[in-house]
Image: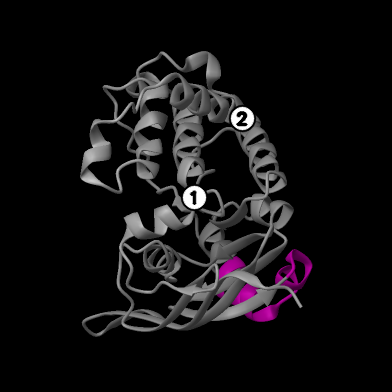
Amino acid sequence: MKQPLLKVEGLRKHFGGLKAVDGVDFQVDRGEILGILGPNGAGKTVCFNMISGIYKPTGGRIFFDRARTDGLPPFRLAAMGLGRTFQIVKPFTSLTVLENVLVARGIAHYGRFRRIWGPWRSKDQVAAAMGILEQVGLAELAGRKAGLLPLGNLRRLEIARAMVVGRKLILLDESFSGLRHGEVSRLEDLIRTIRQMGITVLLIEHNLRVSMKLCDRIVVLDHGRKLAEGTAEQIQSNQQVIEAYLGRRRRKNAAGG
């Protein structure tokens, strides 16, 4: 039996009377690409925020690499090997692409105050950062200001920064959003490469074609609860999913919305 890298049990997050996440259970196996789908407001990003330490759960438990982690701050989870991206990409625009990755590498060195003054831009650090930029296809742009990059490259830079700390698990929050067809295909290839490197991937994605093609398994949320879980084929044929997610989209398109 596989030992999951990430497991959530009865996960809940309430904002006053709003139950944004209400008793969600799922696990992510090592080396897997797991997708979380659902309509807007289903609780997907709230789940990510609890898993990555931004929100403290109202209830339930989270286990990452066999350790209970619900309530731990983001820097502790990053040090444990969990990295993530965000829907809105916010690099350090005045820094170069290389410097953005070097800043992310600081998590391995800033555990103690005295280490802040260490050689954060040593040859070894630069070589390691350049290696990650090679992997995401940004090495030729290492000296460019991050604020000058188009969206497709900004998405890659965000993933590069997540890879620095996410040596075990990376959470990708709508990384395909706003990309053109060619950029989508290249990003799909990158995510498969990340998995081949031994990094597990948990992603939120509204692009159904991408999710069905890329993910080993899919969890569907609706109104904060888990509606379904299974392979792409199982999800596509699930009548509850068709009604809650695909059906809504079809009705919206039919109405011209």
Labels 2 and 1 touching (C-beta < 8 A): no
Residue behind mark 2: 135
Q: Is residue 238 magenta?
A: yes
Residue 174: mark: 1
Which SS type dominates the magenta stretch? helix
Q: Residue at x 45, y 57 (%)?
A: 80
How many residues crowd around disc 1 within 10 Å: few (fewer than 14), some, or many (20 or more)?
Answer: some
Horizontally, residue 207 falls left or right of residue 123, namely right
Q: Residue at x 43, y 66 (%)?
A: 51
Q: Compared to 160, does 167 lie above or below?
A: below
Element type where label 1 sits in the image: loop
Label 2, label 1: how far apart the Cα atoms are: 20 Å
Q: Nearer the viewer, mark 2 or mark 1?
A: 2
Q: Measuring from the top left, give residue 120's x and y in whole percent.
A: 34, 28
Horizontally, residue 91 falls left or right of residue 197, namely left
Name the amino acid, label 1.
Glu
Q: Which residues are magenta?
A: 231-246
Q: Measuring from the top left, give residue 93's x and y in whole percent.
A: 29, 26
Q: The N terminus lies in which quarter of the figure? A: bottom right
Q: Residue at x 26, y 22 (%)?
A: 94
